[in-house]
Amino acid sequence: MNIAFAIALLIAGKVLAQSDPPKDWFNLDPQESHVNGMSTEKAYEYLKGRESKTVIVAVIDSGIDIEHEDLKDVIWTNPKEIAGNGIDDDNNGYVDDVHGWNFIGGKDGRNVGPDTYEVTREYKKLLPEYENKKPSKKADYKYWVSVRDAYMEDAQEAKAQYYFYDSLRSSILRYNKLMTAYLNVDKLSEENLKTVKSGDPLIQLAAGFMSNLVYRVGDMDMEEVASSLDKAVDHYGTQANYSYNLEYNSREIVGDDTTNLKEVGYGNNDVIGRGTDYFHGTHVAGIIGAKRGNGIGIDGVADNVRIMAVRTVPDGDERDKDVANAIRYAVDNGAQIINMSFGKAFSPDKAYVDEAVKYAESKGVLLVHAAGNSGEDTDEENNFPTKKLDKGKVAGNWLEVGASAWGEGDKLAASFSNYGKKNVDLFAPGVQIYSTAPGNEYKNAQGTSMASPAAAGVAALLLSYFPNLQPDDLKDILMSSVRTFDGLMVNKPGAKGEKIDFSELSASGGIVNAYEAVKLADSRKLAQNK
């Protein structure tokens, strides 16, 4: 890593901002608007005049700003719970779960923000058993080696990146202050830096450093350049201090019994996650169901939904116990669709999560999951949770979603998106998605985390107007109605310079299309009524 690369990230961000797509591009029609949206608005034109039923969509995520101006009218309220009385009125094991539940909060009101990665927890758990010892079981030892190698490599990289970005930011601020004072100028330029004539080693170092920087960023303000690195410093700082920290234990906040997977009632009812970063869940919720037609912010995909907030995902890796219990909570409280925009490489209690997935399937609940942002083939690499169950079985109520971009040609597939001809079902818009952000704000974000709720929103739209559809019906209609691109060669995600046919990136080979989906659902309904 070097200064040129780091500053290039900032410059690239400025260029990108100059070529933004329409803010609502993911809902637009490709033929009418020349962006690869989902034809959502065209679907509503087709459905005009028809009645719909409210669909409950659970968002298992980092927390949701349920007070947001564009979300407050679509937030689910538990009809059997009396707010604030401290009583479990509906006897479901969760006290005052008025708008959902927070599985990563404590009874004292604190909430988990940063947390460890699963690889860190597994490394710490297995280290005493395998360090400097001969393996007892070959398969178990192989797993230990994979955990150990992944942890050591990633933890070292995080520390190195944190040191680099923190040092770079400090150097920019320090040397800019030094050289502006030395030259008695308000702002450094290539011209005034060339006038530096000093035998002082520190002045020479500072002049050379700032000359290189000014050459790369032009007339940008140096404090702005330094602050542009804050996000990287915070990101890698969190990784170094929490994600890969063997001594950090977030469950001291939660206060649960980590060995009791079926434990009920731990956590709290703060579905916002106050005191933590709940941007991700708020953004996801807006894509699905931000209030349509209210003249503010954005229009979500689905027009008749209630968003159930289930806080489970920290700034780190979610735990299998929480994921499984979150799925069960959502199912038991009436969710018909569950969006899960998270994933990880290790899943020590996968069997318990699988039980929850099968439970959801038995209750007719569709699970929509983000494929991940590693640019990997998930037919080969792990991304948990997954629709692959034990003994080769596959969950029929699971939709795996990759991310697509708005532009045409070889950039159609998001460069970061995971893919898989078997394990990824379809793609949906996931690049520069404009949606709700905490505090009545709206921001762009990208990832399969944004693509998953786009697809979940279309599924909710379908179920709202065709309420008899079962999860396998929804999945089949969504996959059968995708927009395909015959023979289109795109940049292969995660593989610089390599091309691949877009149809090979997922089982359906296309991008979700709301208009074609409602037409197909309508035609099947008409056929059944004859």
Image (cartoon, grey):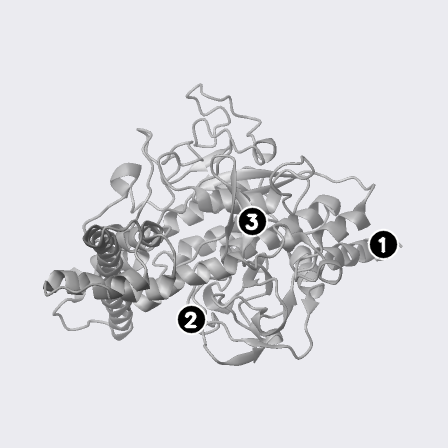
Location of mark 3 (residue):
434
Query: Of the residues shown, which amino acid type is indicated by label 3?
Result: Tyr
Discs 1/3, front: 3
- Side of 186 relative to 101 (left or right): left
Location of mark 2 (residue):
381
Q: Mark 1 or 2 closer to N-term?
A: 2
Tell me the quarter of the picture where residue 300 sits.
top right
**Residue at image location 14% in from the left, 66% down from the top:** 131
How many numbered marks, from 0 up?
3
Distance from disc 1 to disc 2, alpha carbons, whole Å, reads 42 Å
Q: Height in image: 480 above or below 237?
A: below
Quadrant of the frame with the C terminus: bottom right
Location of mark 1 (residue):
526
Report the disc number at residue 40. Answer: none
For disc 3, the neighbor class at 10 Å (few under 14, some 14 to 19, many from 20) is many
Which residue is the extreme one toward the top?
85
Tell me the quarter of the picture where residue 62 sits.
top left
Query: Camera-side residue: 188 or 111?
Result: 188
Discs 1/2, front: 2
Distance from disc 1 to disc 3, alpha carbons, whole Å, reads 36 Å
- Side of 368 relative to 488 (left or right): left
Q: Mark 3 or 2 closer to N-term?
A: 2
Provide the secondary structure element on which disc 3 rests.
strand
Q: Position of residue 431 (x, y in %)?
A: 54, 59
Query: Of the residues shown, which amino acid type is indicated by label 1?
Result: Leu
Provide the secondary structure element on which disc 1 rests.
helix
Distance from disc 3 to disc 2, alpha carbons, whole Å, reads 30 Å
Q: Position of residue 222 (x, y in %)?
A: 32, 53
